[in-house]
Image (spheres, grey):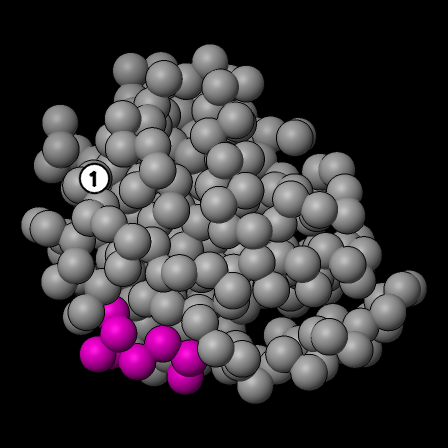
Amino acid sequence: MPCLVQDTGRTGTPLLLLHAWGESRKSFDRLIPQLTGCRTYAPHLRGQGDADKPLSGYSLTKQAEDAAAILDALELPHAAVVGSSSCGYVAQQLALAHPQRVTALVLVGSPLSLQGRPAVADEVDALTDPLDEAWVRNSLTWFPLVHDVPAWYIMDRVRDGRSMPAHAWKSIFNGLCGAIPPSKSGTIQAPTLILWGGQDNLLPRTDQETLAARIPGSVLRTYPDAAHLVLWECPERVAEDITVFLRTLG
């Protein structure tokens, strides 16, 4: 899988960045320059961006194994892992399945559980190729923004969505929603920072508090003036919190 490597500090912590469903590694373009002292690795994930788009392999377990395979390909025995939105779910599964590979975990707008049939499921199930740009643009409105986000960044996310075939949209979504929540399957041992927008219309605070309670020693940090897409709205603050968190771990 194609992977951007940005070295801002060879002695710093290797940091694997996992982008959300429907996006690509480019969603970290505003974050990476501010992650000083880290070696950042931002791959395109299966079915998305410039990665291969096979018809299968999209279960939560497979997505986590893809992340472990990326670490293998990069010859990284372990790394701190940042999971954005739905890929916070994947990051949790990676930390649970491969605890020795994850030195620290940062969950940015990450769900506690995706079980059930979310309201957007019917729309996703109805997708066909070629994907309609208007639908991709409209899908972004599922996640209201509090802060202004640059127009070029929004356009990049539209391009991300259009580059995905319909089967990838569906299979990634169904793989996430059909899985047992990682925090119910076992105990995540990695030091964990949870970042959550206080105006998130998708993930209630009670879920974030439950997630924090299930991960021993984890820290929950709330951004009161942000919504679900914390990474889009507050990349400077996210970068600062990640940097400080990793420094506290030595």
Q: Residue at x 71, y 81 (%)?
A: 123
Residue 89 placement: quadrant: bottom left
Residue 111 can be seen in this image:
yes
Q: Residue at x 61, y 81 (%)?
A: 120
User: Tag count in the figure?
Assistant: 1
Query: Residue 21: x percent and y percent?
Result: 58, 58
Q: Residue at x 56, y 86 (%)?
A: 119
Taking 226 as reference, is 180 above or below it? above
Residue 66 placement: quadrant: top right
Query: Residue 144: x percent and y percent?
Result: 51, 81
Query: Residue 28: x percent and y percent?
Result: 51, 47
Quarter of the N terminus within the rendering: top right
Label 1 SS: loop
Q: Residue at x 60, y 29 (%)?
A: 3
Q: Which residues are magenta?
A: 201-208
Q: Nearer the viewer, residue 63 or 35?
A: 63
Q: Is residue 176 left or right of residue 77?
A: right
* Disc 1: which residue: 190
* Residue, far right: 130
Residue 207 falls inside the magenta stretch: yes
Query: Residue 166: x percent and y percent?
Result: 79, 62
